[in-house]
Image (cartoon, helix red, strand yellow):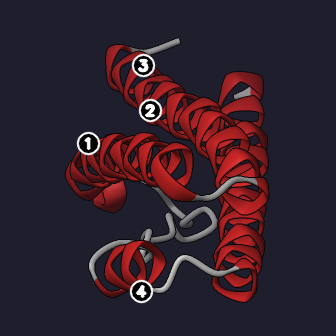
């Protein structure tokens, strides 16, 4: 394996680790989301803050993955599944805290699950590229 290929594989593995960390944080956010949906008052607000703190960490992990991907994009002959952006902050947080209601909690929870699925797809396609490059 030549030096450039080895470095490319290392960078792809770093991207994968950031995405796996993002997925783990989304799992934690999902747990807080469930607590938020079934609780009210101070417990619900606490769960909101814990959930959204996980979202901020997810955004950071995705930002790190994208910055590495930007460096190596030209070295890849093909691109893997687009690394998705998390857009569940800001307005959603405001709506969630101000109008703490089950419908908003459920909508946000399903958006969270859909985003987690997109992260899992990204990891899957990234694994395929890593495997194909290792076979060379």
Q: Can you say whether 125 is above or below 105 in the image?
A: above
* Observer able to see residue 30: yes
- Mark carried by residue 95: 4
At horizontal 43% and vertical 43% (from top left) the residue drawn is: 46
Q: Are marks 2 and 1 in contact (CB under 8 Å)?
A: yes
Calculate the distance from the C-alpha at mark 4 to the C-alpha at mark 1: 28 Å
At horizontal 48% and vertical 86% (from top left) the residue drawn is: 99
Q: Can you say whether 25 is above or below 105 in the image?
A: above
Residue 86, position as x, y percentages in the image: 44, 69
At horizontal 60% and vertical 44% (from top left) the residue drawn is: 26
Calculate the distance from the C-alpha at mark 4 to the C-alpha at mark 2: 29 Å
Relative depth, front residue between 12 and 101:
101
The secondary element bearing badge 2 is classed as: helix
Say which of marks 3 and 1 sits in front.
Answer: 1
Which sits earlier in the primary sequence, circle 3 or circle 4? Answer: 3
Calculate the distance from the C-alpha at mark 3 to the C-alpha at mark 1: 14 Å
Relative depth, front residue between 58 and 7:
58
The residue identified by callout 3 is: 10
Which sits earlier in the primary sequence, circle 4 or circle 1? Answer: 1
The residue identified by callout 1 is: 64
Which sits earlier in the primary sequence, circle 2 or circle 1? Answer: 2
Calculate the distance from the C-alpha at mark 2 to the C-alpha at mark 1: 7 Å
The residue identified by callout 2 is: 18
């Amino acid at each position: 394996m030549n030096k450039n290929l080895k470095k490319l594989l290392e960078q792809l593995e770093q991207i994968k680790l950031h995405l796996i960390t993002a997925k783990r944080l989304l799992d934690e956010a999902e747990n807080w989301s469930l607590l938020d949906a079934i609780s009210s008052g101070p417990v619900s607000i606490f769960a909101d803050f814990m959930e959204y703190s996980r979202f901020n960490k997810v955004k950071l992990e995705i930002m790190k993955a994208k910055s590495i991907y930007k460096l190596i994009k030209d070295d890849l002959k093909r691109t893997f599944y687009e690394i998705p952006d998390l857009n569940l902050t800001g307005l959603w947080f405001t709506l969630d805290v101000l109008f703490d209601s089950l419908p908003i909690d459920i909508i946000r929870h399903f958006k969270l699950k859909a985003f987690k699925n997109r992260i899992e797809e990204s990891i899957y396609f990234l694994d395929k590229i890593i495997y194909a490059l290792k076979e060379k």
